[in-house]
Image (spheres, helix red, strand yellow):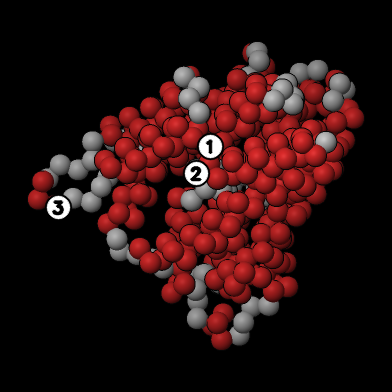
Amino acid sequence: MSGHLLQILGIFSLLSILSIGGGTAVLPEMREMTVVQEKWLTDTEFRDVYSIGQIAPGPNMLMVIVLGYKVSGYAGAAVAFAGFFLPCCLIAWGACRAWNHFEGSPWRLAVQRGLAPLVVGLMAAGMVAIARTAIVGVETTVLAVIVFAALYFGKKVNPALLIFGGGLCGWLFMR
Amino acid sequence: MRVEASVVPHSRGSRVTLWEIFLTFFVIGATSFGGGVVAYLRNSLVTKKAWLDEDGFMAALEISQALPGLNATNMSVIVGDKLRGPAGAALAFFGMTLPGGIMVLILGVAYASNQNNVEVNAILKGVGAASVGLLLAVTLQIGHKQLEKIGDLTIVAATLLLVSFLHVSLVIVLLTVAPVAIWIYRPRARTDGSRAS
């Protein structure tokens, strides 16, 4: 049990430090570590846990709580939450003070400009990781395309409505 | 742009209480459904509370994006720290994560005992598919600037290829692509004329 907790802590704090570009950027690595490497859950369960995270409000990676819970109960949930959120928050806390010292430095601009396309690439990879588990046939493909079109081409559509609408469509058509 | 200098002065005169910080972020954390926490943050911190002006907000967001971690939690830590130091940062963070965290845990516990339920599976299947559409839209909205220039586009494509198709570990990708990308944008004398790519 405590061995599992240490593993959860190790994996999620590593993901935390690597999460440049936000939560979506570490989804492929998170799936690799929890599904492929540790076999804590299946691909379908990974999709389910991600979907649960999407239903709840707030930061979109609170799903790590469910991952931790699945492995080691409530203690696992707490350890996964602390492991995933504390390291990056401590870095943010320290670094925002240091960052201001580099104000006007041309290197600061180089870091921002250089990381921007890297982050977009990592987000795209996160989308691919979820798509591989969530797009499993015609219905799911059509639903994803409709949601994408509504958000990208429509103006001011509330994404929450589309997420809940997706759940409703699933309940109606994907049983 | 400096976050510190951009915190609206009156908030220093009459200090924001820790309770108010917690409550403000708790409300954002409880109402920001469907992702896009940044829009909720701007509406609350800049428009309603006036704790930050637009420049200060953008500066904090730039830092949040360049650092590890989620924008939502990084922003809460940075803004909380600017308002009331470490205690403000901690309360802003917990306010932001507590409502969603509790709800995710309740849903997760319910899921664990019903995961073979056909209806639960169907709902989560639908949510998962909708999320893919959402992720694609968000990625394109954030990335449209990066998809216009050939140099940036190469970095986007290389990153996607390495992670999604060659399954290279994220550590390796960050340690190789990031230095190259920063080097491409390294500061140079303006006389050489050629910019990035």
Q: CA distance from mark 3 to mark 2?
A: 29 Å
Disc number at residue B189?
A: 3
Residue B92 location, x and y as percent?
66, 63
Residue B38 in sight in this render: no
Q: CA distance from mark 1 to mark 2?
A: 7 Å
Q: Are marks 1 and 2 in contact (CB under 8 Å)?
A: yes
Disc 1, SS: helix
- What residue sits 53% from the left and 57% below the top? A92
The quarter of the picture where the N terminus of chain A appears is top right
Q: Are marks 3 and 2 in contact (CB under 8 Å)?
A: no
Q: CA distance from mark 1 to mark 3?
A: 33 Å
Q: Residues within 10 Å of mark 2 (few under 14, many from 20)?
A: many
- What residue sits 44% from the left and 37% below the top? B174
Say what amino acid the circle numbered 3 marks: Ala
Which chain's residue wears label 3? B
Q: Which residue is mark 1?
A: A25
The residue at the far bottom in this view is B13
Disc number at residue A20?
A: 2
